[in-house]
Image: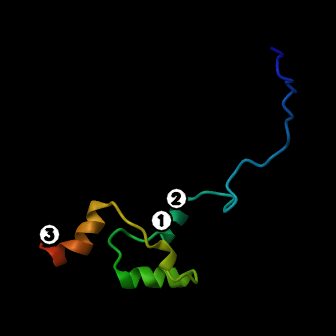
Amino acid sequence: MESPNIRPLTVRNMKMSRLDSLTASQADFDAIMPSPRANGTMLIDLFAQYNLSGSHSIVKDRCFAIQFRLFARYDGGS
């Protein structure tokens, strides 16, 4: 059995970082992220500030606090 032809690894100069930001800031994150207690009106207003409709962010959530707020009043809390 012949051994495979192994070539040396070529090292290239590549940027290894996120493409959406050059910096990270907890304060900036806190300023733009909605509170877990935000109601629909607050979320719509927040999305509108960034020219977003919010429709892209509809997901199945698994957070008990959010599920309780959304569904407890409709199904007796169960």
Residue at (70% x, 51% y) in the render: 17
Q: Which residue is mark 1?
A: 30
Q: Is residue 45 left or right of residue 6?
A: left
Q: Is residue 27 left or right of residue 59?
A: right
Residue at (87% x, 27% y) in the render: 8
Q: Is residue 31 left or right of residue 9?
A: left
- Closer to the camera: disc 2 or disc 3? 3
Tell me the SS state at disc 1. helix
Q: Which residue is mark 3?
A: 77
> What is the C-alpha distance between the residues marked 3 and 1?
31 Å
Q: Is residue 30 left or right of residue 7?
A: left
In the rendering, at what x and y percent does residue 33 appear?
A: 47, 69
> What is the C-alpha distance between the residues marked 2 and 3?
35 Å
Q: Around disc 3, counting alpha carbons within 10 Å, would you say few (fewer than 14), some (14 to 19), or many (20 or more)? A: few
> What is the C-alpha distance between the residues marked 2 and 1?
6 Å
Are the two marked residues, 2 and 1, in contact with CB atoms closer than 8 angstroms?
yes
Tell me the SS state at disc 3. loop
* Nearest to N terminus: mark 3 or mark 1: 1
Q: Which residue is mark 2?
A: 26
- The amino acid marked with disc number 1 is Asp
- The amino acid marked with disc number 2 is Gln
